[in-house]
Amino acid sequence: MATSGHGRRQPDLLLPVAAVTSRQTVLRSATTNTLFTPRTRLRFGERAFRVATPKAWNQLPNNVRSLRDTKSFKKKLKTFLFTKFYYV
């Protein structure tokens, strides 16, 4: 997974699926690289790739989401997941 060079800080895999949240006013959350999660009417729709992907991305800590280097991203992601599931 490589990050895009278009000024966005998300993997290229997410580009066709997710859009970076943007607002006209500057909020503290504007620097957190969150992605827009579409609303769904049914619980079934929450499992769709276009909904689940940005939801999972937004749940990552900011220090993982903000990494631009693929190798560093994978390392931090692996550390985060192991810590989350094995050191409860």
Image (cartoon, rainbow, N blue to C red):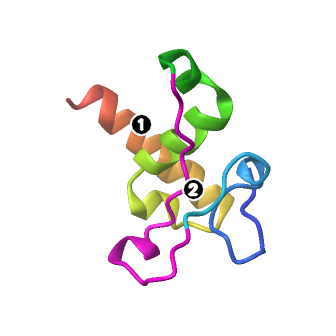
Give the magenta-colored segment's residue range. Answer: 22-41
Q: Secondary structure at mark 1?
A: helix
The amino acid sitting under disc 1 is Leu
Q: Position of residue 10 (x, y in %)?
A: 64, 59
Asked if the residue under mark 1 is in contact with the one under mark 2, i.e. CB atoms within 8 Å, the reply is: no
| Above-or-below relation of 47 to 50 | above
Q: Residue at x 41, y 62 (%)?
A: 62
Q: Quadrant of residue 15?
A: bottom right
Find the distance from the CA under tag 2 to the CA under tag 1.
Answer: 12 Å
Q: Is residue 53 left or right of residue 66?
A: right
Q: Is residue 46 above or below residue 24?
A: above
Q: Is residue 55 magenta?
A: no
Question: In this rendering, would 78 be left or right of 5?
Answer: left
Residue 28 counted in the magenta span: yes
**Looking at this view, is 83 or 39 the one in front?**
39
Badge 2 marks a residue whose secondary structure is helix
Residue 6 versus residue 38 in the image, above or below: below
For image coordinates 55% across by 15% down, the residue present is 44
Q: Main secondary structure of the magenta part?
A: loop
Give the total number of marks visible in the rendering.
2
Instruction: Please rate how many residues cluster around mark 1, counting C-alpha atoms within 10 Å: few if below 14, some from 14 to 19, many from 20.
Output: few
Residue picked out by circle 2? 73
Q: Residues within 10 Å of mark 2 (few under 14, many from 20)?
A: many
**In this picture, residue 18 sits left or right of residue 88:** right
Identify which amino acid the numbered label 2 is placed on.
Answer: Phe
Which comes before the other along the chain, label 2 or label 1?
2
Residue 14 at x, y percent in the picture:
71, 49
Residue that carries the numbered disc 1 in the rendered image: 81
- Which of these two is toward me, 11 or 74? 11
